[in-house]
Amino acid sequence: MQQPKSKSTSIFQDLAEAVDRLGERAVQTLLRDAIARKPSEASKKNAPHKNVKIPPVIRTSVIQSTVDRLQKAVSREEAKHSIEVSEFSRRELEALARLVDVPVRKDMKIGDIEDLIVNMTVGGRLNSQAIRGTS
């Protein structure tokens, strides 16, 4: 004889079914958005209720479109321009760097982060193509 489902079991089963219906790409987008966000100060248990800074919103769709443009860029200049026109904040640049596996140090300036992203993504690909003799 089966025991009746608990409320939490039912909720988790409904959640699992909803995730299955979303599809792999939608789930990856949700996870990427969740990774890019940090918990706000207000969500911490001991955080004071006054003078709480609300973190700026990270434009994940703009970051993702920049990643796509970086993958298609044929020159370092084109890649640099793609990053510059987006006018990213430091937090957004750090999120972009995480998505393209570029390590960022806390002491780096915004221009240094932009240059590093360009050099490690497009620059690395162009160098590899030059060594192999392909274009």
Image: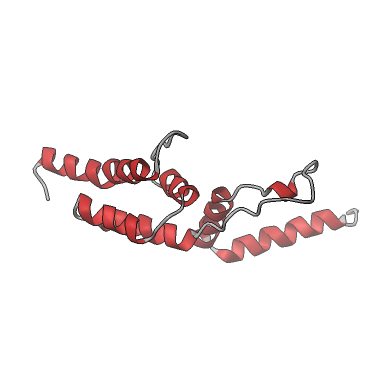
Position of 30 with respect to 130 (left or right) is right
Q: Look at 18% across and 45% down and name the residue there.
A: 126
Query: 61 or 87, which lies in front?
Result: 87
Residue lying furthest left in this view? 133
Query: 121 or 82, which lies in front?
Result: 82
Q: Look at 78% across and 59% down and name the residue there.
A: 11
Which picture quadrant has residue 62?
bottom left
Which picture quadrant has residue 110?
top left
In this view, 108 is above or below 22: above
Position of 133 with respect to 38 (left or right) is left
Which picture quadrant has residue 133?
top left
Percent x, y of residue 31: 56, 53
In this view, 79 is above or below 94: below
Q: Look at 55% across and 55% down and name the residue there.
A: 33
In this view, 15 is above or below 96: below
Percent x, y of residue 123: 23, 43
